[in-house]
């Protein structure tokens, strides 16, 4: 199992992991706020049925055979619009999709703690900022909390 660790203070603690829980809790809170804002802002109706090929202009959750999961907008049976993709290795992508691919603005939270914020094209990161574990500035986390993935 992977854990995403964020060091918002850039300080160390002689006591070891005693300050790890508040940072992880903050990270979880930011993700929950993003999801709440994402869900509240969505004007799409829930997807009906289990066949994703029939999902059109709706919002739904799809579990893949490999254990990955996508939550977000669908059009013509493809991921299209805003969504979040949870990889089995612990990575999470939150951003825009076009015709089943990560396209547009998005943020990738890698399982090892790296964060890439920027523009994606056909699943590939094109430009933006890449941060090492614990090195992203505070506005990155604020943007997630307020879902500014426009």
Image (spheres, grey):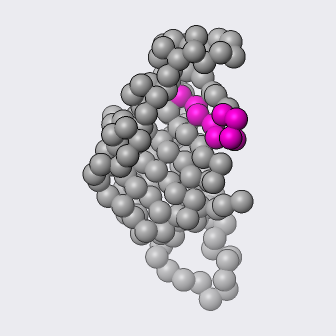
As rendered, which of 132 and 36 lies closer to the eye? 132
Q: Quadrant location of residue 147?
A: top left
Image position, residue 90 (x, y; %)? 62, 53
Q: Is residue 96 left or right of residue 111?
A: left
Image position, residue 102 (x, y; %)? 42, 37
Taking 70 as reference, is 43 above or below it?
A: above
Q: Which residues are magenta?
A: 64-72
Quarter holding the C terminus? top left
Residue at (44% x, 58% y) in the render: 115
Residue at (67% x, 77% y) in the render: 17
Q: Quadrant location of residue 141?
A: bottom left
- Residue lying at the far bottom in this picture: please name it: 14
Q: Quadrant location of residue 70?
A: top right
Q: Is residue 79 left or right of residue 14?
A: left
Residue at (31% x, 44% y) in the render: 119
Taking 47 as reference, is 99 above or below it?
A: below
């Amino acid at each position: 199992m992977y854990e995403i660790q964020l060091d918002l203070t850039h300080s160390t603690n002689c006591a070891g992991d005693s300050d790890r829980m508040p940072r992880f809790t903050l990270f979880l809170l930011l993700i929950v706020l993003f999801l709440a804002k994402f869900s509240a802002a969505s004007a799409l109706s829930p997807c009906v049925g289990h066949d994703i090929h029939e999902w059109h202009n709706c919002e739904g959750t799809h579990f893949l055979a490999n254990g990955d999961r996508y939550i977000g907008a669908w059009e013509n049976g493809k991921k299209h619009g805003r969504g979040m993709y949870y990889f089995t290795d612990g990575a999470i992508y939150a951003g825009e999709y076009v015709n089943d691919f990560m396209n547009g603005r998005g943020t990738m939270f890698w399982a090892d703690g790296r964060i890439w914020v920027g523009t994606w094209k056909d699943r590939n990161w094109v430009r933006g900022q890449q941060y090492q574990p614990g090195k992203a500035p505070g506005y990155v986390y604020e943007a997630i909390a307020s879902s500014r993935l426009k």
